[in-house]
Amino acid sequence: MMIKKVFVAVLMTAALAGCETQTEGQQRATTGALIGGAGGALVGQAIGGNTKSTVIGAASGALLGAVVGSATTPQRRGEQLCRYRDRYGQIYTAPCDDRYYNGNY
C-alpha cells in the first residue's frame, strides 16, 4: 500500500514539474526535490524499515534535493547587446551569443 502512495506522489510531482511557467531555477528545484524525495524514501525505508523513517527520509531528501537543485542553477549574465552585420551589410544589435562570453569573436 505504501508503494502505491509513493508512486502516486511521484506522478503528481512529475506532473507539476512540467509546468511551462516555471523558471529554470524553479524547474531544477522541483526536479531535485522529486529525486531527493524518492531517494530519501528508499534510504529511510532501508535504514528504519517502518513508515516513520520512510516519511522522514522522503522529507529530508526532498528538502535537500530542492536546495541543491536551486543552488546549482546557472546564473544568467546581464543581457549584453552586441553589434552584428548581416549578409547584406546591415548592422543590427541583438543579445550577445556564447562567442562573446568565451572570447571567440
Image (tube, rainbow, N blue to C red):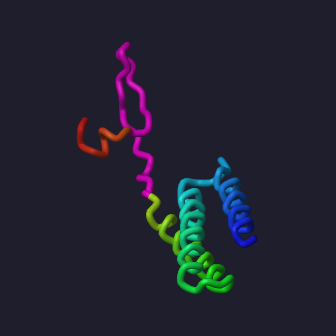
At 52% from the left edge and 75% from the top edge, which residue is drawn? 64
Residue closer to the observer: 49 or 27: 49
Quadrant of residue 72 within the rendered picture = bottom left
- Point out residue 16 in the picture as x, y percentages from the top left corner: 69, 56
87 left or right of 14?
Answer: left
On screen, residue 55 above or below 96: below
Task: Single out the residue that lies furthest toward the top.
Answer: 88
Quadrant of residue 51 within the rendered picture = bottom right
Which residues are the magenta region? 74-96
68 left or right of 62?
Answer: left
Q: Is residue 66 visible?
A: no
Q: Is residue 49 visible?
A: yes
Residue closer to the observer: 95 or 90: 95
Question: Quadrant where the N terminus lies?
Answer: bottom right
At 66% from the left edge and 80% from the top edge, which residue is drawn? 55
On screen, residue 86 above or below 32: above
- Point out residue 102 in the picture as x, y percentages from the top left corner: 27, 45
Question: Quadrant where the C terminus lies?
Answer: top left
On screen, residue 54 above or below 18: below
At 71% from the left edge and 64% from the top edge, which residue is drawn? 9
84 left or right of 22?
Answer: left
Is 76 a magenta residue? yes
